[in-house]
Amino acid sequence: MPSSRRRLPVSAALVGAVLVTSACSGAPGPGAAGGPSTTAPERGWDEVLAEADGQTVDLWMYGGDQLGNAYVDDVLAPAAAELGVTLRRVPVTDTADALNRVLSELQAGTEDGSVDLVWVNGENFTSGRQADAWLCGWTGQLPSMEYVDPEDPLLTSDFGTPVDGCEAPWHKAQFVLAYDSAAVTDPPASMDELFDWAEANPGRFTYPAPPDFTGSAFVRQALYAVAGGPDEVPAEFDQAAFDEVAPELFDRLAALAPSLWRAGDTYPQDLAALEELYAGDQVDMTMTYGPATLAQQVASGALPESTRVLPLEGGTLGNASFLAVPVNAADQAGALAVADLALSPEQQLAKADPAVWGQYPVLDPDRLPGDVAAASAALPSSEAVPPFDELSRDADPELGAGWVGPLEDGWRSDVLGAG
């Protein structure tokens, strides 16, 4: 989401039920005899498009991003219609809602599922893979994959889980903090300096409460800071490593809490709430995993004109969002056609325009057609947000999905609970 946006835990009972069903002799699970195959059939692209013609693809995606909603409805859907595919956006408050629907239908033996395509990444992708819920081996069929660097680490691994052709890249993201340069004349240059600044300026900083997607990302960024950098934290979750590095993180955030907005007695529930505080001059900083949309908000006047991205020594977290197809998608060919369309140079260019959505492309600039490359270079720039190549320099790798839940649980008990 985002990125696939805010993500709550997928029902462990549903994941377990699907895994058990796959191994037992009851209703067929994914890949079982009589059940939906987890591997896409090999076929020519013309065959895919012929089958897709006339299908209706239900794209389940986070519905709280108005620019994203408008892009899908007003740009991507009309382009899909030219292929004979009706694209229907299904808004959800959390990507886990889409995966839970898939898992419920798989458990019930439903082979013509109501979810055709999902905007996903991170732990929801990992949970779906564990339950064999995603169709795999299909992205190599997409003609638009020729524009993707096959060695790009952001696109070959999703929060530590190998992609393995089970989802198609959609856009890249970079976690950033931003500040009001009119109010903060000597901004901090690192996470440690940010903690010190917040304590020296009580009430002027806060962050969304995990499990909000942005708040959870802030906690992971803080973990790297207190641990001494990404090299000090294993990418794959390990309980012994968690027990070693997490207590210092929670101690630091608990010590920071009294200096936060409202003395840490309450936290913004999501990014929108934090942006409202920032726009209303109640705090001097905000944060986002979508810095290109930050530029649009400044241009529209929703955020102060003096907003600037806060460069941090050592870089910040980077990831990518994807489109996944459930194994029991009723309109599988149409879903593949839409995923390829969304990856095309023309759609990636349209989506990158800050006036449209402002999401960073996943395509390799050196592989783009000349006209698209020229148009990409001509996209409007912003004083508030540096170019993506500058933002993503020295980007920190995302932790494996297994870290997310324990960090969020620990924050609630040892930081929020301590208050």
Image (cartoon, rainbow, N blue to C red):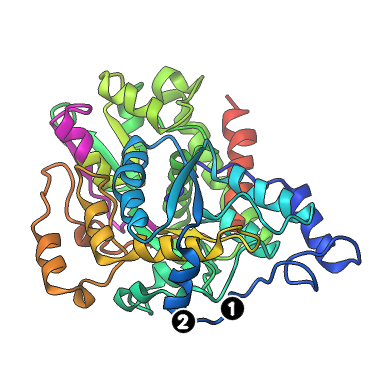
Drawn side of residue 208 relative to residue 184, left or right: right
Residue 226, percent from left and from top: 45, 50
- The residue that mark 2 highlights is 44
Which of the 4 image quadrants contains residue 41?
A: bottom right
Who is closer to the viewer here, 379 or 393?
379
Q: Position of residue 117 (x, y in %)?
A: 52, 55
**Direction from residue 128 to residue 340 in the image, left or right:** left
Report the magenta residues as a range: 296-319
Q: Is residue 7 visible?
A: yes
Q: Nearer the viewer, residue 207 or 345?
A: 345
Classify 10 Å Cα crowding around label 1: few (below 14), some (14-19), many (20 and above).
few
Q: How many marks?
A: 2
Amino acid type of the residue that numbered disc 2 sits on in the rendered structure: Gly
SS category of the residue bearing label 2: loop
Residue 303 belongs to the span the image colors magenta? yes
Q: Quadrant of the C terminus?
A: top right
* Residue topped by disc 1: 41
